[in-house]
């Protein structure tokens, strides 16, 4: 489904009775896919041309990383269930879908002041297995499949001797992203799925077990991530990305409610609740960055099919990049 006309950033909010920046109604009053509507058959078919070598790269971190999740979230639990006396096993897992690689669905984060989610939905409309804007709508529509683009900020920062901790609050500036796009001659297309490598997983993997255990208690806290300004949100809107993701724990500079942000402007509020644009976090971009750098080529075919969790909030990525 395509809107009759894609509005400019300055025309937001579309629903003037709703919170700032919203695009409610752009895809119709009952829409549950948001920017994933940009993944039309033509867009996906064109993305298939990115497959030139058949090299496949998994983009999911192991479910047990990070070993000590932040924000009090439960760690991954796995149990093998032996079916003796038969030579046979089942297994059972327990996860918080926010604790490792994930796509945030539209039930995850709403406008904090208005207490509304995408399309104006409210908390009392949600149940555990039914109701609107569950993440199962992503997989029911065929998943997040199209042309992925990697912006390797971490590799660029190392090249330019810029050092920032992924574990402290700090901004990756739009000007830096634009510089990387220009330096690498990356051609952005409508419907692209944007990935930004911040260095979080690389820096996490370098921590000792004791440092990993202390990560939720680190001082000072916060996270390195994409800045949330009107200019940065304009750039995301005007490039018409279908979804955005990174290796960071929060995609944007964290915490999203920090004093450096306008309380009514954060990527989580505007992207998830305002535009219906999925946000991916803690994707493993290390091998992808290495392969892309070796080829001088930063686009790829992305196949990501979230779990069909009826009424779900988030899901592991189940993502593969194909070069």
Image: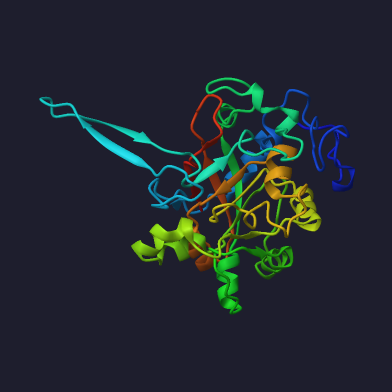
- Would you say 47 lies left or right of 114 here? left
Place residue 223 in its image quadrant: bottom right
x then y, percent, for residue 250: 58, 52
Place residue 84 in its image quadrant: top left
x then y, percent, for residue 272: 68, 40
Outermost residue toward the bottom in this view: 161
Q: Is residue 132 visible?
A: no
x then y, percent, for residue 77: 34, 40
Task: Tell me the residue at 42%/42% (across/down).
Answer: 74
x then y, percent, for residue 156: 60, 71
Name the colour scheme: rainbow
Task: Tell me the residue at 50%/57% (across/down).
Answer: 285
Place residue 23 in its image quadrant: top right
- Would you say 242 lies left or right of 50 here? right
- Would you say 313 lies left or right of 113 here? left
Give whichever of 23, 52 is nearer the camera.
23
As displayed, is residue 71 above or below residue 305?
A: below
Outermost residue toward the top in this view: 130
- Would you say 266 lies left or right of 96 here? right
Q: Is residue 59 visible?
A: yes
Quarter of the image where the N terminus is located: top right
């Amino acid at each position: 489904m395509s809107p009759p006309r894609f509005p400019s950033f300055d025309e937001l909010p579309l629903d003037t009775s709703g919170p700032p920046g919203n695009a409610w109604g752009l895809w119709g009053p009952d829409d549950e896919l948001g920017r994933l509507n940009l993944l039309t058959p033509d867009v996906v078919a064109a993305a298939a041309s990115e497959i030139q070598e058949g090299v496949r790269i998994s983009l999911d971190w192991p479910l047990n990383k990070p070993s000590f999740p932040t924000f009090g979230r439960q760690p991954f639990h796995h149990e093998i269930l032996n079916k003796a006396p038969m030579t046979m096993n089942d297994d059972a897992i327990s996860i918080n879908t926010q604790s490792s690689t994930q796509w945030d669905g539209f039930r995850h984060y709403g406008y904090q002041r208005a207490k509304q989610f995408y399309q104006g939905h409210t908390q009392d409309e949600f149940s555990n297995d039914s109701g609107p804007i569950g993440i199962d709508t992503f997989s029911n529509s065929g998943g997040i499949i199209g042309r992925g683009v990697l912006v390797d900020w971490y590799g660029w920062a190392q090249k330019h001797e810029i050092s920032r901790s992924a574990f402290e609050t700090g901004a990756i500036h739009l000007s830096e992203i634009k510089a990387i796009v220009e330096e690498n001659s990356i051609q952005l297309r409508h419907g692209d799925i944007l990935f930004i490598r911040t260095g979080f997983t690389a820096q996490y993997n370098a921590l000792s077990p004791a440092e990993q255990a202390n990560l939720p208690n680190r001082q000072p806290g916060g996270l390195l991530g994409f800045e949330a300004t009107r200019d940065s949100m304009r750039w995301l809107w005007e490039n018409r990305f279908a979804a955005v993701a990174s290796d960071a724990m929060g995609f944007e500079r964290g915490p999203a409610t920090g004093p450096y942000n306008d309380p009514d402007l954060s990527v989580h509020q505007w992207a998830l609740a305002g535009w219906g644009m999925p946000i991916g976090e803690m994707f493993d971009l290390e091998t992808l960055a290495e392969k892309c750098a070796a080829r001088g080529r930063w686009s790829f075919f992305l196949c990501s099919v979230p779990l069909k969790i009826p009424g779900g909030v988030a899901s592991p990525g189940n993502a593969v990049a194909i070069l």
